Structures are given as C-alpha cells and as structure tokens.
C-alpha cells in the first residue's frame, strides 16, 4: 500500500511541476538587493558578516555541488524555497553552509541523494518535504536543530472540495510519513531525536555525549584536562571523543570548545545553553490547569479551520490543550487593535475587548495587527518612555498597544502576558512598518512578545505553499496567505508561542545561594540549600561538581571533599534556572595558635583574637567557644567582649580538631 501511495504522490507531484504555473515559485522574491552569481547559476544576497545566502537556483544540471564561495563570499545558508520544484537528482552541500532554510528543496521529486558536511547546524521546517525519491540521509553531528517535516514527509493538497456544512469550497491537506526513510547519525544528537519523534528509521553510527569527552558520564574538569593535553600533543582523541568535544558545532575541536565547557562548569551557563541543546527548550509546569485569556482577530479565532463541521482551532487551542488550561477566546474576524468609529459591539477592537476583562487570568495572550494593516489604520507614535499616564490616542496602532500594556500592567500585574505578532504576508509592503511600531510600543513597556514574522519564514511563498498551509480561497484557487490551517497552528504557530511562554517563565525563575564562596578542609563535608524563586511548583535539582577529584556532590547537594584545590558546585533546576558557588579546599591544619595566650580586660572591653596557621595552604575554618559566657562572649570571627568580672578561656578549634586557647581575666 505504501508503495502504491508513493507512486500516486510521485505522479501528482510530477504533474504539478510540469503543468502548474506558479508565480514567484522560489524564495528569490523574499529578498531585495539580490545578486546574480558570475556563473549565472545562483541568485544570492549578502549578509552583514560578508557571507552569502543562496535564494534561488537557475541552473539545469541534475547533479549539483553547492559552491563554498560565490564571487568571493562564503556560502553560509540555502534560503527559503531556493530549490523549489527543481529537477535536481543529487546535491552536495559544503561545510561552509550552516543553515538549510524553510522549504529549501520543496517538491524536488527527483532528488535521490543529499550529501551534508560537518559544520551544518540547522535544517529548517519542511526543508526536504515532497522529496519522494529521497530515501535516506546522513546527518552530521554538528546539526543541533532539525525542524518539523524536514525529511521523510510528503504533502498533497486536494482543492475545490465541497464543504456542505458551510456551503463553500475548501482544500484538504494529506500528509504521508515514510517510516522507512533512514536517518543515519549519532545517538545523543538531534538526528536521533528527530528520527524517533518523526517515527523514521534510525541507523546509529555510534554514540556521543557533548562535553563528556572521557565518557565517564559527567562533564567535569577531567574533560578540560583531556582537551588541553590534546592541544599540547600529549593526548590522542578518538573520532567520537572529537565529536563530543565539539560543543560549538563548528566541525572542529578548538579553544572555544574549552571556553564553553568551562563556562558550564563554573556556573556561567546552563546545560541547555550549550549549542547542541539550544534548540530544546525547557518546559515549566507553571501553566498547568490555569486560566487562559486570548484576545485577537481571525488569526486568534482560527478562521477557516472549521472544515466539514470541525470546531474552530488556532494557537490558543494548542496552548490550552497542551497545559490543560481553561480557555476564554475573545476573538472576532476583521477587528483591529485600535478603536474604530461606528462599530457594532461584536466588532469592537482588540483594545476594547482587553479593557472589558473582568475575571482573573493566569495567562493573557493578545494578538492583532493584520486588520490595522489592511484597513490602513493610522499608525501613530509611541510616547516617551517616561509617559505612563494611560492617556494615549487609542484610534492609532501605537496608542492602542500602549493602552493595552497600561491596562494589563495596572490590573493584571501578576499574570503572565504575551503579545503575538503574525507571520509575514508576501506583497504587503507596509507590514514591517506596522509590526515595527507595535514592537516599539511593547518594548517601551517591557511587555513580552513573539513576532512570528521574525522567528521563522512561514509565509505564503507561492500559490502551492499557500494552498498547503493557509485557508483556501475559492476565488483565487489557492490559500489566502492570512489564515493558517490547523496543521500550521499545531506545528508552527503553537510551538513557537509555547517556546516563548516557557522562556518567559524561566526568566521569572532564579536560584541563589547565601554564600557564593566557601572554604573547606580536605575531608570535610558541607551542604548549602539553594533558594528558589520561580515558576515550577515542584522543583527537581541536578547537582554537579567541576572537579570530582577535589569534591563530589550527591543528589541532594551534600559535598564531600577529597583533594586540595578549587571546584565549582552547581545546581540546575528542571525549569532551566541555575546557580553555583565556589569551593576552595585546603589542607587540614596540623597546628593552630592564637595571637594571645593570656589577656587582661575590663568590663565592656572588646578585642579581636587572630588565628595563626603554620601553612598558608591550610583551611582556616575555625570555631570559637567561651568556657564562661557570663564573663567573656566570643563571636564567630574571634572578637571577644568582657561581660563580667572573673576568668574564662576562649578556645579556638580547627576543622581538623587541633585547638588553641587564650585565658582571659576580666576586672
């Protein structure tokens, strides 16, 4: 059955290549200032760093080797839709390329072989979708991000279907996952994760653990020593060890790898901040079973997703379902952010809907802007940062956004909040002008937002992609480029918004220690309870030591010292927050003296007793006690105070057990 379906898809997709007339087929139209390569095979744009992004392929060869340079510019990226509908059969991508963009090889139905080189880092959404002749790919270990539908997926849209429930023509998307598609790569990398999550076949080339170069199941200073010996020529590394050491994912082992591992060991970053894991965001539990309010236009409403009697679906439904939240979706098609005159009550603006809120909500999401763009609402200006008066021109976009921020800051200060700006719509020349003023207003108020148009390349790139990912418009026989399909909400809008919500929660979390530096003697034990402020109700901690030969920590943060030196004790919560303290371990003292053996004092006098250690490398963690506190009291630093007449001894005890004493007479 799978074979027959594949054949049917091949015929349909091939026919679409031969007969469909699709304007702006590849991604070239997304970019201004395009250049044509000297060999006239590629259109490209230059980045600020001097690299080139290929935005279209103009050649007719079936076997393509992407050049590492175009006209002297290193090729770093293959852009959105660059090879859309190409007849290529093989492609070799050089190590200079770091990113393969959205839909880069969409509908390359003849493509049979893809060669990727070490140094590649990201393979974006749908990069090789509808490449039905491609049966497998070898993923380099440097790739840390493979997005949805990158491999092994075919998509076919049926159009002009009769939806009798709404008496309209609609389109229906059919997705086919080739479970026999083979991903070859290393266990412990995103290639393995992607294959498992996409239910594709995975062929293991071995196992690597980024940062754990000596394979002792820990990232610690032993890994740093191993790398330094390797650079000095005293140590050889196996292939898997070199791959494990490449935490900056550039395809080589270098000093920057040491720096990044050291930053992790010293508590300057979390494990998730290391590049191989940066695409995996931490999920918090702060939103579970809470109340969610969403205000917005038809994007929030999910217009066009109610096919064949189904309920409307959009990103609020995705978020509420993900966390079991009670959802209030206050949305209506065609409404603007700003106030409009002579509007019916049901057509009131997003601003007016927000200001009419009465119930308490744990999470508030606001979205809008497209209708302000379409209706040419006056943009307005963002007021000075010091203006928090609440009096703004609510008939302008800037004023409406400021009023939303003011109202929510005043009335829902403790709630989590997010503003959503929609995807890029092709041929809307003023969209960025509107989106820019919205961002500026939000930034003035430090109001969290996610801009889909900047986060990804989701757009109505051409008629076919528009039909595949947007609500069908019968008059144009294609998608409208405005309203995402349910699939797009579930796999694009929803995950991007969820990631931002979790970032907001993590930013609100923190771990701290009362003491950032502790001195211990070898052989001593110690524990310090971290203070946690954050989003999770139940927090799990992961403890680690940068120098296990000096100090080790158990699962509860109790430290035992074994050697002399410095170690960093780090704790990381499951919501991604982290902290550390420095542990200085010295030799236990073998002898101890005080600055005075005897002392005469008068009632009310104070005096500081100083400890004297023979070795400067010995620990000076000492305790003081008085044999008669009514005569002499002593503080933790050895300061004594005469309280009453009589005699008393002050005894100083070192961590090793040796003592020294001073006899004090008070008159």
Image: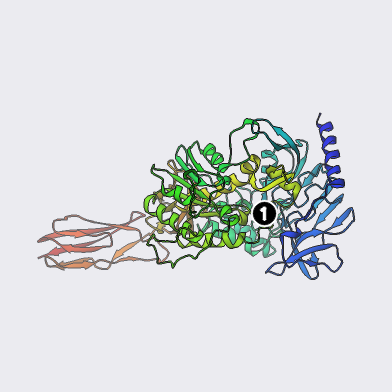
Residue 534 image point, x, y percent: 43, 48
Q: Nearer the viewer, residue 470 or 89?
A: 470
Q: Nearer the viewer, residue 631 or 543?
A: 543
Seen at 11% across and 65% down, the residue is: 603
Tell me if residue 562 can be seen: no
Q: Which of 276 and 33 is in front in this view?
A: 33
Tell me if residue 17 can be seen: yes
In the rendered view, would you say 422 is above or below 136? below
Q: Viewed as shown, does residue 619 lie left or right of 285?
A: left
Q: Viewed as shown, does residue 622 lie left or right of 566?
A: left
The residue at which mark 1 appears reads as 457
Q: Viewed as shown, does residue 535 lie left or right of 90?
A: left
**How many numbered dots are placed on residues in this image?**
1
Instruction: Give the position of the C terminus as an image quadrant.
Output: bottom left
Q: In which quarter of the image is residue 453?
A: bottom right
Q: Which of 13 and 377 is in front in this view?
A: 377
Seen at 65% across and 42% down, the residue is: 485
């Amino acid at each position: 059955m799978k074979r027959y379906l594949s054949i049917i898809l091949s015929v349909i997709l091939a026919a679409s290549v031969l007969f469909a007339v699709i304007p702006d087929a590849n991604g070239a139209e997304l970019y201004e200032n395009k250049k044509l390569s000297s060999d006239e095979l590629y259109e490209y744009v230059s980045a600020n760093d001097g690299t080139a992004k290929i935005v279209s392929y103009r050649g007719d060869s079936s076997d393509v080797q992407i050049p590492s340079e175009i006209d002297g510019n290193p090729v770093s990226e293959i852009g959105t839709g660059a090879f859309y509908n190409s007849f290529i059969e093989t492609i070799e991508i050089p190590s200079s390329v770091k990113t393969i963009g959205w839909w880069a090889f969409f509908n390359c139905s003849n493509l049979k072989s893809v060669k990727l080189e070490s140094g590649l880092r990201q393979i974006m959404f749908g990069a090789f979708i509808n490449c039905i002749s491609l049966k497998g790919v070898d993923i380099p270990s440097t790739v840390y991000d493979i997005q949805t539908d990158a491999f092994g997926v075919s998509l076919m849209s049926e159009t002009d279907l009769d939806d009798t429930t709404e008496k309209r023509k609609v389109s229906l998307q059919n997705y086919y996952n080739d479970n026999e598609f083979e991903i070859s790569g290393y266990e412990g990398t995103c290639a393995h994760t992607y294959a498992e999550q996409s239910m594709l076949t995975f062929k293991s080339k071995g196992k690597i653990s980024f940062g754990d170069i000596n394979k002792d199941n820990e990232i610690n200073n032993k890994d740093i020593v191993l790398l330094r010996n390797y650079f000095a020529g005293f140590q050889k590394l196996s292939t898997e060890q070199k791959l494990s050491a490449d935490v900056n994912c550039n395809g080589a082992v270098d000093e920057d790898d040491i720096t990044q591992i050291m930053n992790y060991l010293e508590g300057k970053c979390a494990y998730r901040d290391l590049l191989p894991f940066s695409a995996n965001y931490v999920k918090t539990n702060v939103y579970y079973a809470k109340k969610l309010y969403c205000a917005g236009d038809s994007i929030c409403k999910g217009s066009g997703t109610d096919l064949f009697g189904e309920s409307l679906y959009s990103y609020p439904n995705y978020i509420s379902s993900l966390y079991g939240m009670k959802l209030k979706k206050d949305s209506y098609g065609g409404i603007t952010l700003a106030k409009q005159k002579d509007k019916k009550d049901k057509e009131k603006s997003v601003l007016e809907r927000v200001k009419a809120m009465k119930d308490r909500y744990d999470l508030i999401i606001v979205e809008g802007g497209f209708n302000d763009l379409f209706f040419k609402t006056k943009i307005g200006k963002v007021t000075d940062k010091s203006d928090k008066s609440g009096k703004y021109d609510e008939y302008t976009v800037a004023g409406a956004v400021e009023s939303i921020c003011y109202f929510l800051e005043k009335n829902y200060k403790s709630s989590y909040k997010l503003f959503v700006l929609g995807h890029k719509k092709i041929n809307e020349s003023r969209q960025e002008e509107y989106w820019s003023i919205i961002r500026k207003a939000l930034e003035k108020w430090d109001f969290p937002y996610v801009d889909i148009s900047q986060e990804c390349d989701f757009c109505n790139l051409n008629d076919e992609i528009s039909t595949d990912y947007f609500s069908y418009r019968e008059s144009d026989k294609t998608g409208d480029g405005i309203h995402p399909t349910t699939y797009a909400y579930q796999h694009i809008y929803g995950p991007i918004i969820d990631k931002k919500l979790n970032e907001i929660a993590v930013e609100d979390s923190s771990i701290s220690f009362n003491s950032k530096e502790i001195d211990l003697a070898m052989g001593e034990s110690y524990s310090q309870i971290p203070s946690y402020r954050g989003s999770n109700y139940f927090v799990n901690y992961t403890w680690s030591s940068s120098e296990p030969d000096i100090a080790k920590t158990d699962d509860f943060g109790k430290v035992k010292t074994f050697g002399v030196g410095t170690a960093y004790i780090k704790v990381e919560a499951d919501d991604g927050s982290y902290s550390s303290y420095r542990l200085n371990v010295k030799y236990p003292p073998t002898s101890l003296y005080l600055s005075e053996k005897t002392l005469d004092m008068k009632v009310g006098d104070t005096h500081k007793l100083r400890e004297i250690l023979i070795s400067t490398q010995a620990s000076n963690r000492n305790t003081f006690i008085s044999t008669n506190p009514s005569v002499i009291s002593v503080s933790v630093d050895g300061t004594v105070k005469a309280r009453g007449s009589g005699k008393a001894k002050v005894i100083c005890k070192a961590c090793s057990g040796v003592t020294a004493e001073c006899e004090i007479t008070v008159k």
